[in-house]
Image (cartoon, rainbow, N blue to C red):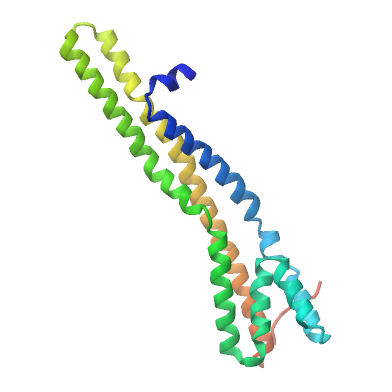
Amino acid sequence: MIEIFLAGGFLMWPILLCSLVVIGVSLERYWTLNPAKIAPKTLLAQVWSWIKNNQVDASKLRELKQSSPLGQILAAGLSNSKHGREVMKDSIQEAANQVIHDLERYINILGTIANVVPLMGLLGTVFGMIEVFNAIMLQGSGNTGVLAGGISVALYTTAFGLLVAIPAMIAHRFFQRRIDSIVVTMEEEAIKLVDALHSDRRVDVKLV
């Protein structure tokens, strides 16, 4: 494997670096994008219990904000709940934008690598083919074995590029879908809180 890697030329090194970045980002995002930590299922019920018992104060809001990304959104809404429904929704939206930005951190790196690495592999193959044709000009085309070996070496970078790009694309799609799912959950919880405080209709907030 080491011989194949070295035979691929200098572009194998940036492809290797990209593969390490994909592994690192994927592990970090998998650990960070944990739905149970980002949007705890019992958090809204806990907040509703504080509201019913008139326990919402500055310390509770600070505790809520620091507990999780969903807590950060709910705390922003509670801080402005006395100013009306629209103001509360606007403050929740602003907090949600910041949370979503944090959730999407490094995700675009995976997409960029998935698009760029195949081109790097193709460029390495082009350089390899140029060397093969230079050898043909100098030595002729009589030795087909040497030519076939040279062409196979030239294709190594394309193969390695695809081996990195495919997992990067899968990881990018996977984490993007997970983020979308988490955002929908947080949006539902925030809407429940707004409706519970600024609506006459009954809102189902389960206490657990």
What x and y, as percent, mark residue 40? Answer: 71, 65
Quadrant into which the C terminus falls = bottom right
What x and y, as percent, mark residue 38? Answer: 66, 62
Residue, x 39% and y 19% (percent of image)? 7
Q: Taking the image as drawn, is residue 79 in sight?
A: yes
Q: How many marks?
A: 0
* Image height of 45 relative to 194, above or below: above
Residue, x 77% and y 84% (percent of image)? 51
What x and y, as percent, mark residue 187? Answer: 59, 73
Residue, x 23% and y 6% (percent of image)? 143
What x and y, as percent, mark residue 142? Answer: 19, 6
Residue 110 appears left or right of 137: right
Residue 198 appears left or right of 149: right
Question: Dividing the picture into quarters, in which one does residue 148 lie?
Answer: top left
Q: Nearer the viewer, residue 138 or 107?
A: 138
Question: Dividing the picture into quarters, in which one does residue 194 lie?
Answer: bottom right
* Image height of 157 relative to 135, above or below: below
Q: Taking the image as drawn, is residue 141 in sight?
A: no
Task: Farthest residue to the top: give it.
Answer: 142
